[in-house]
Image: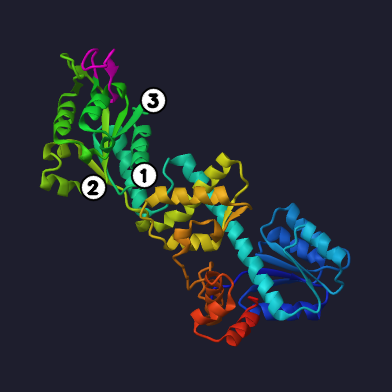
Amino acid sequence: MMAQGRLLVVDDERIALNNLKHILEKDGYQVATAASGAAALSLLDGQEFDAVLTDLRMDKVDGMQILRRCREKELDAEVIVITAFASAESAVEAMKEGAFYYVAKPFRLDEVRKVVAEAVEKTRLKRENRLLRERVESYEGRVKIITQDGEMLRLLSVARQVAPTDCNVLIIGATGTGKELLAKYLHFASARASGPFLAINCGAFNEDLLANELFGHEKGAYTGAAGEKRGLIEAAAGGTLFLDEVTEMSPAMQVKLLRVLQEREVLRLGGTEPIKVDVRFVAATNRDVQEAVKSGAFRQDLFFRLNVVALRIPALAQRKGDIPLLCMHFLKRFAGLMGKDVGEIAPEVLDLLMNYEFPGNVRELENVIERGVAVCTGGRIELAHMPEELRQFPVQSFRRRNGGLLTLEEMERNYIRWVLGEAGGNQQLAAQHLGIDRVTLWRKLKRYELE
């Protein structure tokens, strides 16, 4: 069975030390003990713990010195101070020094269990967020696309092989998957990296405007054409032109583009002399191209010209392992842009996002995190900072964050807490939803400390 966490218990009273060790080990924790403050400091120098439970008053090295050492060394472990000599002054001092909790002897076992579980969870969350930050930084240093998904990594491997060849590439993927980002990846991994990268959405213009944007015009080509204008194909010379949603082009525009691809020359509107161009074309679509060809909406010969290499980007719902990485990437970016000290994402938020299908793909996730950072008032994005439409879909995980299974009691506690939240704290309404009477709910609230 997987350990719940690794604890260090420090107390110079052997009986109290062994009793607490016995209790916590029965709860599934891996427990190390130290019978003195000096012994505890030695263990902290060489080992890693999720939480430290220390007596406050001990000879030579006391609990406050242990707490300070943990903070000086920037250890992840949360420190819980336990003492039989409780006072307001010592409690305030301990909390100022960064203690997670202050427990007075004699303590209740259920209180200690609750505090330890919360301390271990907070430590794990810190480590997960730090690990995600480190991985994001490593990915940003090597590639432009944040991913750890096997299929995406294979796609990037193919893209790196294709990039130097200068052949045309067709990128296929749903809206919001990052087709333009992949096109830029190809550009910057090619010999054309020092040249321009220009992009146009072919579905955003009517036929005449798109022709003018792509091919440019000569002076006097039409009313209002006071001077000549280079089109994007000319402007992208020596670089890459990205044609997004290329399947939205009209049949006439498809013919003109096909000629450019075949002859490697462009004719401006109103012009008579073709202009040679040196451009790499990367096209993209969110449609089923084969179906578009079969229906006659897209020319087969143009498809063959563009589809020298096809790269298919999977939807975010097919690579959910990327969600935590992308969350941290967007968190870091938007926190910096907004000048906010937001560095963590609550486990409940990650659970929600991991179970959401994201019809808008990576772009939708980016918007969700941007909103979370914008409305966050502390250092961590919580469920309350998520859009209401996401919070309408409850996510219940049957596993703990460390992978262990939840007990039936934990499941019941979580569900009651969620129903109470949905009922706005109205216990009568919550009892009705749960199918129990008000007294039974009151007993369960007391039992699970949800009052």
Q: Tell me the quadrant of the picture where the C terminus can be found.
A: bottom right
Q: Nearer the viewer, residue 116 or 139?
A: 116
- Residue named by callout 2: 287
- Residue named by callout 1: 178
- Element type at mark 3: loop
Residue 378, percent from left and from top:
64, 53
Q: Inspect the image, locate mark 3, and give the three-letter code of the amino acid beneath it.
A: Ser
Q: Inspect the image, locate mark 2, and give the three-letter code of the amino acid beneath it.
A: Arg
* Cα distance between the residues tagged 1 and 2: 15 Å
* Cα distance between the residues tagged 3 and 1: 22 Å
- Residue named by callout 3: 194
Q: Is residue 300 magenta?
A: no
First to last magenta residue range: 217-232
Q: Residue at x 23, y 41 (%)?
A: 309
Residue contact at pointers 1 and 2, CB within 8 angstroms: no
Q: Inspect the image, locate mark 1, and give the three-letter code of the amino acid beneath it.
A: Gly
Task: Judge whether residue 31 can be spotted in this image.
Answer: no
Q: Mark 3 or mark 2: which comes first in sequence?
A: 3
Residue 436, percent from left and from top:
53, 86
Q: Nearer the viewer, residue 298 or 227?
A: 227
Q: Is residue 46 left or right of residue 419?
A: right
Residue 174, percent from left and from top:
30, 49
Q: Nearer the viewer, residue 52 or 117?
A: 117
Coloring scheme of the render?
A: rainbow
| Magenta span dominant secondary structure | loop
